[in-house]
Amino acid sequence: MRRLTWLIVGLWVLLLVSWAGADLPPEVTSWVNMIKEKYDGTTITCAFCPHPTTDAMQAMVDEFTELTGIKVRWDIIEEGYLRQKLLLEHEAKTGVYDVLLIDAFNLAEYAPSGVAVDLKPFLENKELTPEWFDYQDILPAYREGIGMYQEIIYGIPVAGETRYVGYRKDLFEKYGQRPPETMDDMLNLAKFFKGKEESLYGMAMRAQKGIHFGSGWLTVMYSLGGQLLDQKTWEVLVNNPKTVTSLEYFVDLLKQGPPDIGVYTHEEALSAFTSGRTAMWFDATALTPWVIDPTKSMISDRVGFIPPPAGPAGAYGALAGWNVGISSDSPEKEKEAAWAFIVWMTGKYKAKDYVRLGGTPVRESIYQDEELVKENWTFPVQLASLERAYNLVKEGISWIPPHPKFMKVLEVVGSYGSDVLVGSMSAREAMDKAQVEVEKIMAE
Amino acid sequence: MKKREKEHHLFILPSFITLIFIVIFPTIFLWYVSFTNYDLSMGWENKSWIGLQNYKYLFLEDKDFWYSLRISLFFSGFTVVTEFGLGLLIALLFNRRITGKRLWMSFLIIPMVITPSIVSLIWKLMLNTEYGVLNYILSLLSIGKINWLGYESALWSLILVDIWEWTPFMALILYAGLQALPQEPYEAALVDGASSIQLFRFITLPLMRPIIFISLLLRAIDSLKMFDIVYGLTQGGPGNATELLSLHIYRLGFRHTNWIGRASANAVILLLVVTLLTTVLLRIMKRESGEKY
């Protein structure tokens, strides 16, 4: 027992010595010293949910506390409950949280109620925000697509995802096919591969009734010219001919998948692809580790990826992700300490450590880092897919329309879409009915 | 004397207070909310009284309500009758001398004690068209793939899972009933030369009637409220193939739409259906046993 105690003490001393002696670049050292002088002993509280970002930051936090003297408390709340908790704490103005993990889907709801503060004053403060933080290095698609709402910066992106197409290189070579470049190619290839071999289907995607169907449909909708809502006027475009065409296309694509695709979430779609049942898969980049992990995937050595194919309206990609922001109810001094935490965790200086500890890359320099690309060969394709996601942002369109009622709309159209998939009504008929319902929702 | 007559009021007061909190207040609240436009994302203070609008929406505008009600009644009727039939057969089998009875009985309990959400996950994997074990077994028998969770068959798959999980419950209740039956009527009937079918028809069934009614009642109420398995297995899809009334309530109220008022109106209707069914079954039971209702 005594030996064990000495061993633990020894390890701690070794750890402290290694930190104290760690060679920080001079510009980092001067920032760290300034922060320590100002905020030593301050305690900040983070409201996060179980997520690779949380794991990575928790692994990095001891070093941060040692260098700056800022203590960090964690409140890890289940993902579905985090949104409700943040809204309730803000309503009661408790100010218990300083750093918030914000799902980009919820920004439209948080912004009007003032849950998080505008981070621009912090970014412009040269003392608090050193050059090595490098905000501009974060991919523009993430900066503008998931960190901002109505041009106000509410969060620094920490995890982002887009969607891309995975395909079976062996099957494509065997049958002399090329990966799809357009939406038409993709549908034709899905039709080509369906039934080509025993138990082989063309495509795997999420399509379960409701939000999953809606989310899957959004993956192809914008490239085909469809939109559910006009993001400038909030006019309902559910039965717009192009939106209806995009639904018909999506349903046609799903019909090239396994027969029970109508109950697939992203998990079943992933399983269908990784177990070798489908020639293609169109889903989130965040799921890539499962596809290329030989212990989880039967096709890990035979898979290739390409950015989302272009459609008649353009080449667009999905965009979703998480930010860290600062609570508006946090006291001023703690707000600044919280910003120091964000600078350390999300800055360029620690970006490589963050990714190696399981964090999702959000910086251009990381996607182009040779060492990291060797460790994950899908980075360049992910980056190309993100460029397509940025095309949408440049058009002034958010992949998830920034309206507080959008999740309701998606649930309703996703329910009607599922009716179209099973053949109980035509796409036109379903969208005419959905249009009436969505108009009522928007008018409420 | 008068004081003593009213003494029982004091003793039933705790139960009454408990009932007010756990049954009466929530029910009144449910009725009240069903007449408002309460929306979770709008906040409690912004709700307003809208009369019968939610009921009008359900009856006239909701594309899934009538279908949900129909399949809920069908699901409940079919599963309860099948579970009763199978449960009675198993109970009669157990009522005989069979070897390893305790072991068989413990196997029988397994489906019932598994958490329903786990049941749905297990069955979701087993029913998968491509890598599910059911289709694998069928392929060994040279039978083609069945799309278990497709539009046409998803409800039947749901029925299959419910029967798998709850037949043991029926079997155990009925077995307990059979064990408690007096032996004298059987002995007398055997002396009179009754056949085993006659014993079953004229002695077992009439004596078992109260326990049969209770088991039917419990299962009928339970199956009308069924939520967990269908939530895990299909989430009401594909299309509206398995959107039972309970799942429809959930979808209206809690799946991003946040229409708590409409969901409450739907819940009131489910409550009325369950109450009606319970009343009818209780009336039949009391009439059969000769009691006045």
Image (cartoon, coloured by chain):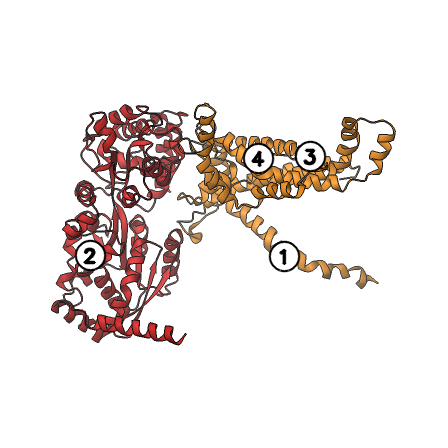
Q: Separation of disc 4 and disc 2 at Cα?
A: 54 Å
Q: Nearer the viewer, mark 2 or mark 3?
A: 3
Residue B18, numbered circle: 1
Do discs 2 and 1 belong to a common subunit?
A: no
| A196 up-or-down from A142: above or below | above
> In this orientation, does residue B51 appear?
no
Q: Separation of disc 2 and disc 3 at Cα?
A: 67 Å
Q: Nearer the viewer, residue B211 or B251?
A: B211
Q: Nearer the viewer, mark 2 or mark 1?
A: 2
Q: Which residue is mark 3?
A: B93
Is the residue marked by circle 3 packed among few (<14), some (14-19), or many (20+) residues within 10 Å? some
Q: Separation of disc 4 and disc 1 at Cα?
A: 34 Å
Q: Earlier in the sequence, mark 4 or mark 3?
A: 3
Is the residue marked by circle 1 packed among few (<14), some (14-19), or many (20+) residues within 10 Å? few
Label 1 residue SS: helix
The location of residue A319, given as percent across then percent down, is 25, 44
Chain represented in orange: B
Answer whether labels 2 and 3 touch (C-beta < 8 Å). Answer: no
Q: Separation of disc 1 and disc 3 at Cα?
A: 42 Å
Q: Chain of mark 3?
A: B
